[in-house]
Image (cartoon, rainbow, N blue to C red):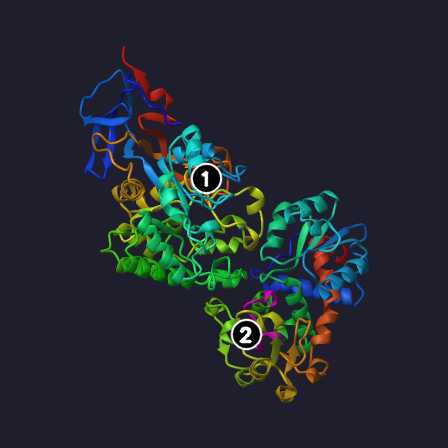
Amino acid sequence: MIRNPGQNSELVIRHARVLDPSTGLDAIKDVRVSSGRIAEIGDGLRGMRELDADGLHLFPGFVDVHAHWRTPGREDEETIESGSAAAAAGGFTGVVMMPNTDPVVDKPVVVSGLLRRVERESRVRAYVSAALHVGLKGERLTEMQLLKEAGALCVSDDGLGTPSAGVLRNAMLYARTAGMPVLLHCEDHTLATGVVHDGAAAALAGIPGSPASAEDAATATALVLAAETGAKTHITHVSTALSAALVRFFEDRADITADTTPHHLTLTDDLISTLDGTYRVNPPLRPEDDREAVTEALRDGTLDFVATDHAPHASEEKELPLEEAAPGFLGHETAFAALHTELVLTGKLSLSRLVEAMSCAPGRWVGEGGSLAVGEPADLILADLSEGWTVGRESLSSRSWNSPYLGKNLTGRVVGTIVGGELVYDRMGARFGVRA
Amino acid sequence: MRSRDFLTLEETSREELREVLDLARDVSDGRLASPLAGKTVCLAFFEASTRTAVSFELAARRSGADVISLSENGSAISKGESLVDTVVTLDSLGADTLVLRHPAAGAAKLAARHARAAVVNAGDGRGQHPTQALLDLYALSEAFGGLDELSGRRVAIAGDVLHSRVARSVIPALRTAGMEVALTAPRTLLPLETDVWDLPVLPSVDAALEWGAEVLYMLRLQNERMTGGSPLVSSVAEYAAYYGVARRHLRRGVRVMHPGPVNRGVEISGDVVLDERSLIPNQVAAGIAVRSAVLALATGVAHEVAA
């Protein structure tokens, strides 16, 4: 619930290490939030309500362009309330919900219904991705212009690839007409006949593999068509070295962007040897060479940002042999901690680039958030980069617990999340003070 | 002695292999009377099986166990109960050992995580089929004069390695026994990264014999690999010519093995199946003794009775 803050909603956050790559700021500062916006950043600011952030980092809120909140249809797995609580706990102040729900988000009335529920139930800003094709079937185009009028942000058949290049090309041209960005899950289903990466680990374990070409061939097709049609196109969850290189080939095209996920940046296909359904995800976890290439592509900006592909699943869909389990991982609550632990603390990625990739760049894509410039909405987070914690079922706000990091020790944790000046997640409690 | 699971042969040591074979020899010689008396063995087959199911059932009954058989027909399995729930139920009913066949790799490992009973993997997906490889090793040992006589001998595994759980158990078992292993199959029937086993890949059965194979281990080629939307082989004739074993291959006295059921005229010509150089009947016969031994070890009674 993002309430309109009243006149007395002023808050001064004091002595935080403020890091905002969008403005180049990286210093210990005070931040004044007023009427839901960033009012002032400086030294020695005082206010009626103060938050002592000594020892904490302050970033623009993270933005996740790829999440499944399972609403409508699978509210046993996630709801807008629980999904947004998980997002807030992970520092996400803006989230795009994918349309592969039941019913599919392919009609304007479903979009407007969802947005009404977001207004009532969501702790963070939530945006609707509508379907690119009716029923995600890759046949009839959705009414993209009406979907946009109803409030959809973008279009996607996420979860599925597009059946043919011809179908995708028409959809891109039509989306361009509607002025809607297209978010693409690139997967050639004639190649993707398995459930894990077709590599050494799959061969040993005897789990049916899908070759990297299933992603690479579809990514190449999507990029070529995006360049030709001029459609604003975003390639989501890039997971292979070759797909990253293909995206790099088109790096001068500002209307083509791409992301990768925290799990493809931190985990590899050696987890197949566990045979545990927990580790099934699509695209599948890849070998170390791919993980390194994708990390480098994120570092150098080839991949514009990180998106989690937060995909809750009920335990009965995961407590299965790997090849029978549903694909997908929770993402919101562990994204920052996993990336901070595995990439920043190991020196593979700067903290500044991580914040740019989780906040600024996806914020620009969504058109809201990701900056602490004065006048911007006060969507920001406080993080304790030294806090060590163990990911456990009980610590998760999501309704599901299918995290590949369960039981792992991570370092760095979001302790406070503010959306539009409103504190929507708070593990700081005692730090608040009201000046007499 | 505590019970133990038999899930995979990937990490099994030579001494552990020897223990099973020695015990199977004892069973075969009648030195192990009713070791499972008073124990309950549950056979849960989530996938159709004839020879493995029958072999396990005979092994369990001849060892004196009470046997419960669940198959996919007419049980909770066919009513959509999950693997974990079925396992927990059988466990709660007091099964001492659970023999599990399942269409997905990792099923036995998952079952073992949820069961107090010992779990014996009777084949899971393309993953593992440990008792098959153990009985193969038993039949080979008998044919060559003991486990130690296998060291340094060459065996070629021919056919559909990609989809074969048998191959994934036989490869580590034969290598642990000291044998040199090669593969022969078209690339469509091998994993993309065949290097994981670090084995030579030979172009045909003829080439395998030139390489010095004394044993040809033939894998079954399932019909759907030859037909279907994207067939993996061109024709039976071409497959049989390169990767099948015919009588002419037996001239040097090589031994032929097959886990069954055989496709006569595809991977093995009809007149080879029951040739005296075929170990196929020996493999089937070894099944009962080896599975009795495995059940005794899994249930934790082997040492008490063998001592």
A6 on left or right of B208: left
Quarter of the view holding residue A16: top left
- Residue A377 drawn at (x, y percent): 27, 30
Q: Pointer 1: residues within 10 angstroms few (<14), some, or many (20+)?
A: many
* Residue A130 x, y percent position in the rendering: 41, 45
Nearer to the camera, B223 or B174: B223
Question: Which labelled disc corresponds to residue B181?
Answer: 2
Tell me what residue is drawn at x 37 percent, y 57 percent. Answer: A170
- Residue B82 in the magenta stretch? The answer is no
Work out which residue is located at the far top of the displayed protein and give it.
A436
The residue depicted at 47 percent of the width and 33 percent of the height is A82
Please tell me whether residue B142 is drawn above or below residue A403 in the rendered image.
below
Foreground label between 1 and 2? 1
Q: Secondary structure at mark 2?
A: strand
Q: Where's residue A296, x and y in %?
A: 29, 54
What residue do we see at 38% from left, 61% from top?
A: A216
Please tell me whether residue B152 belongs to the stretch shown in magenta.
Answer: yes
If the image is split into quadrants, where does the C terminus of chain B sit?
A: bottom right
As drawn, A422 above or below A329: above
Q: In the rendered view, would you say A223 is above or below B184?
A: above
SS at circle 1: helix
Using the rendered view, name the quadrant where residue A36 is placed. Answer: top left
C-alpha separation, residue under disc 1 versus residue under disc 2: 60 Å
The part of the chain drawn in magenta is B150-166
Give the labeled residue for mark 1.
A110
Q: B282 and A164: which one is in front?
A: A164
Chain letter belonging to callout 1: A
Looking at the rendered structure, the kind of residue marked 2 is Val
* Residue B133, x across and y down, in percent: 64, 67
Pointer 1 with pointer 2, Cβ within 8 A: no
